[in-house]
Each structure stands twice: as structure tokens, then as C-alpha cells.
Image: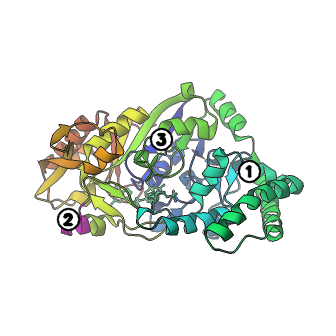
Amino acid sequence: MPAVVIVGAQWGDEGKGKVTDLVGDRVEYVVRYQGGNNAGHTVVIGDQSYALHLLPSGVLSPDVVPVIGGGVVLDPAVLFEEIEGLQERGVSCDRLLISANAHLIMPHHRALDKVSERYLGKARIGTTGRGIGPTYGDKIARMGIRVQDLFDPGILRKKLELALREKNQLLTKVYNRRGIAIDAVVEEYVTYGERLRPYVADTTLVLNQALEDDKVVLLEGAQGTLLDVDHGTYPFVTSSSPTAGGACTGSGIGPTRITKVIGILKAYTTRVGSGPFPTELLDEWGEFLRKTGGEYGVTTGRNRRCGWFDAVIGRYATRVNGMTDYFLTKLDVLSGLEKVPVCVAYEVDGERTDDLPMTQTDFHHATPVYEYLDGWWENISEARTFADLPHNAQAYVRRLEEMVGAPVSAIGVGPGRDQTMEIRPLI
Ligand code: GDP
Ligand code: IMO
Ligand code: MG
């Protein structure tokens, strides 16, 4: 009954989509357990590139059952657009299952996400503007609207009336925007309900039965550890729990079922949106990483902020997720450097610390302490075994492994499915 979790170890965009796709033919179910269409996962298969936002990346493997768990927030229009886009390219989404408990992103959530960011001015989070935060906010405040509510138009209207009573006041009186008319929304969402109905299932029952039957369930996190609402760089985080614990609540699988937690770790660091980032490079080296690594957002098209590898973050990710393995991605991007700086610790107000500072204030003051590892010149995109890597690239991986405290079991040397080496079987 193996349940395996894939979790981003940094600030997202580590290459989770590629890894999920890679192991797609070894698993029976792939579950998204949190987040929504704030995610952007690029999967490259042969000469085809797919950008996924809401659907689990396992959808591209023909025998996988993709599942949208109850911890996800779902924008139905986005889902249908994604399904249609894939169908046009010959990818079937017929096996998709959606939890009846997943919360819906409503028009007022999208409107409030955009307008509240504008009001925050310089203090803004830099959200994706997809309505993620307001939807999770309402979920926790117990005024959310769930997939199952679409099957009872009377209940849907009642819940929406309650929500809009407050949200329209906010939109019109605080933010000076137009209010939202209920009738059009009810009509739109009831139609969505009809289209969603064939996919909706008691997904926790299905997944637990699958585990009883010894099927392999892969729990695919979106975002990353440092964007976790509890364990990330709050308030510059997303509003859900990408860390391994979130895989249980977001899917309805108990913690005792989880057999492996695979962290996806980029060989350097990136982040999108605002918030502290100790190893950020604002010089030509940042530009080098952005250009060489193609670090532009899949969802919003924004430039990703880039910096050297941060082992403090890595160690922290190992700790809060209980990582059993790492998949190190984008090692190829670092080819051609004389020396590769790696942040081994921080200095906070003159004092060295090996761990993430306890307070936000200290984290904002943290400056990286670098170790300079020897670089390599060779193009490694054709390497398929660890022995194929130049000696210094091997040493880089070994040093990272030592610093983060969990084994690197696989390495990515390019975006393609086959541009991977598995040192030991991931699943
Ligand atoms: P995700 O959000 O974690 O799924 O990651 P994204 O898809 O947003 O960003 C990762 C990007 O790096 C994508 O464009 C991938 O195709 C690409 N990628 C993944 N692994 C590798 C790798 O090992 N090397 C290179 N060069 N690109 C990679
Ligand atoms: P994947 O799954 C990188 C960031 C946003 C913003 C913050 C909050 O592709 O790794 P939100 O819209 O979630 O309320 O925005 O979180 N963010 C991501 N950054 N990768 C992602 O997803 C992200 N999803 C959200 O940029 O800083
Ligand atoms: Mg991404």
C-alpha cells in the first residue's frame, strides 16, 4: 500500500511536473492535494510541451487515474479549458476524479484577490491573482462553496447569498468596485455542476480502497515548502499546505500510509512574487540563471527571481517534510561556471546560523555565507548515469546531499522525460 508524496523543497517551480510525469507509468493514481490554478507545471514529452495548472501532471500517463483532492481549490472554467486543450492534443481526461469537497473559486474570490493586492501597494504578496487566498480564507471561515453544492441549486443560491452579502459590501464600499450579481453566477455555476458531475466522486474512499488493493498512489504537491502557509516565509506564502502533512489532509489518506516523501530540489533557487530570498542575485549572475534555466513563470509569465543554491532552506525542507529522497533538477543549468557558490549558512546581525531563523525579522536580515565549489564546463544534458557526470558535478551533488541531509536519488539534466538519471529507483 505505498503512498508516495512529491513535494517542492524551495519556493515552487522546482520541476515537480516533470518528476510526476516521469514516474507516471509506475503509479496507478496521481492526486493533487492542495493549491489551484496558481500552479504552473511544464512537462516535456518528446517534442511536445504541456503546461498544466489544475490537473495533476499524471494526466499525461494513459493508465493513471488523475484525482483532484478535497484540499484543492477549483476554478471550473479553468478546469474545462485545460481538459479541452488536452483533448484537442489527444490526451484523454475521462478517468479524472474530483472530490465533492473541493472548494470552488468564485468570481468574488478572483475580484478580491486582485483588488486587495492593489490596496497592499508595496506590501503586496505578488499573488497569481487567481483567487486562491480569498477562496481558502472563506473555507477556513466556513463560508466557502464546494463542488457538491453545485448539485443543489437551492443550497448554492443560499450559500452564495450569504457570501455576497459580505463580499459585495467589501467590493463596493471598501474597494470601490462593482458588486457581483447573484443570478448570473448561480446560472453559470449550475451549468458547471452539470459538466463536473461525471467526474465527482468520494475520492478519499476511492484512494483508501486503492491502497488496500496495493495500488501505488502518488500525491503531487504544487507550490513548495517555503510557500506553505504554516511553514513558509509567511505572509509571503500561498494559502495552502504544500508540505507533506498537507498531502494527508488534502487527500484523506492517513499519515501511516505514506511510505516515501520525495523532495524536488532545484540545483539553484528561484522564487516568484514578493518576500525574503537570501541568495537572490540582482546582478548578471541572476540573469545568467534566468536565461539559461528559462526561469519565466508558466502561469503569469513573470520573471522568476533567481539565486544560488541555499542549503539552509534545503535542510529545513528535509526537516518539515521528513524527506526520504531528493530529486535534484536542473543540474545542467550550472554547466560553464568556474566556481559554483552554495549558501551553507546565514549571518544574521553578525551571528552565524545554520538553521532558518525563528522570526520573520531575522530572516529578512539574513545574508548568505557561501562556500565556493568547483564548477564544470561540460554539457551534461546527455548524461544518463551518475558516472557520466564530470567529477566536479558529482562532487556538487554529493556536497548538496550532505548539506540537506537526505539522499539525492535522481538527477535532472534537461526538461525532457528522458533527461534524467535515477541513482536508485524512486518508486
Ligand atoms: P513545477 O512548478 O515544479 O512543476 O516546475 P515548472 O514546470 O514551473 O518549472 C520547471 C521548469 O524547468 C520547466 O520548464 C521544466 O520543463 C524545466 N525542467 C525540469 N527539470 C529540468 C532539468 O533537469 N533541466 C532543465 N534544464 N530543465 C528542467
Ligand atoms: P508551482 O506549483 C511559484 C506564489 C505567488 C505568490 C504567492 C501567493 O508551479 O510551483 P497565490 O496566488 O498562491 O495566492 O500567490 O505564491 N506562487 C507560486 N510560485 N510556483 C507556484 O506554483 C506558485 N503558486 C503560487 O507567486 O508569491
Ligand atoms: Mg511551476
Name the spot of residue 349 as percent of width and height, x first. Answer: 19, 45
76 left or right, relative to 248: right
Way the structure is coloured:
rainbow
Q: Residue furthest top?
A: 256
Residue extending furthest right? Answer: 154
Instruction: Name the residue: 30% across, 50% down.
Output: 364
Looking at the picture, tell me which residue is in the foreground, 264 or 62. Answer: 264
Q: Which residue is mark 1?
A: 146
Q: Amino acid at mark 3?
A: Asp
Above or below, comparing residue 325 to residue 376 in the picture: above
Whether the residues at callouts 3 and 2 have beta carbons within 8 Å, the answer is: no
Q: State which tag comes first along the sequence, 3 or 1.
A: 1
Mark 1 vs ligand 2: CB below 8 Å: no
Check residue 284 for magenta coloring: yes
Determine contact: label 1, label 2, CB under 8 Å. no
Which mark, by number, is residue 230? 3
**Residue type beneath disc 2:** Trp
Q: Say whether residue 123 is magenta.
A: no
Taking 283 as reference, is 123 left or right? right
- Asked if residue 323 shows in the view, the reply is no
Classify residue 330 by image quadrant.
Answer: bottom left
> What's drawn in magenta, residue-wise?
281-288
SS for callout 1: loop
Q: Contact (CB < 8 A) between labels 3 and 1?
A: no
Count of labels in the image: 3
Q: Secondary structure at mark 3?
A: loop
Q: Which label lies toward us, 1 or 2?
A: 1
Q: What residue did someone put label 2 on?
A: 285
**Label located before the other in sequence (1 or 2):** 1
Cα gap from disc 3 to disc 1, whole angstroms: 23 Å
SS under mark 2: helix
Q: Amino acid at mark 1?
A: Arg
